[in-house]
Amino acid sequence: MLSDKSRNYICSQVADILRAERLKQNLSMTKMAERAGLSQQMISYVERELRNPSLDTLLRMTGALGINLADVIRQANKAK
């Protein structure tokens, strides 16, 4: 089982990876939200770590970016 510190770090890394990928693709939060079927506010909350997204939200966000959620989590876990 992960410690709270490890879990929080991985969550933070996932948010950073999603934001970096969105910026790399030159997508606004609004455009990403449209693609993902989410509100722009939800994208902002996730990227700023103000909300812990559900699995569905993460799948929608990674789908909108054309990336694999499992790869994002692996990358976040390696960063620790």
Image: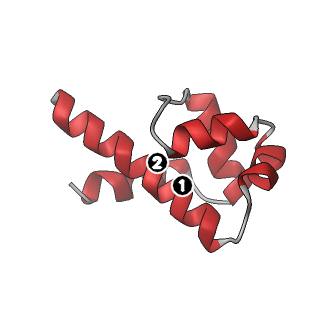
The front one of 78 and 26 is: 26
Q: Is residue 20 above or below residue 53?
A: below
Residue 58 or residue 30, whichever sits in front: 30
Name the spot of residue 75 as percent of width and height, x first. Answer: 37, 59
Q: Position of residue 36 (x, y in %)?
A: 76, 43
State the CA–CA distance, disc 2 to disc 1.
Answer: 5 Å
For the C terminus, the image quarter is: bottom left
Quadrant in the rendering for residue 60? top right
On the picture, is 79 further left or further right than 15?
Answer: left
Q: Residue at x 84, y 46 (%)?
A: 34
Identify the residue position indicated by label 2 in the image: 15
Q: Mark 1 = which residue? A: 18
In the rendered image, residue 31, in percent from the top left (x then y), is placed at 81, 54
Q: Amino acid at mark 1?
A: Leu
In the rendered image, is residue 73 in sight? no
- Disc 1 crowd, CA 10 A, few/some/many (<14, 14-19, 20+): many
Query: Would residue 11 be seen by someone viewing this image from the given angle?
Result: yes
Count neighbours of disc 2 (C-alpha within 10 A) and say few if under 14, some if 14 to 19, many if 20 or more: many
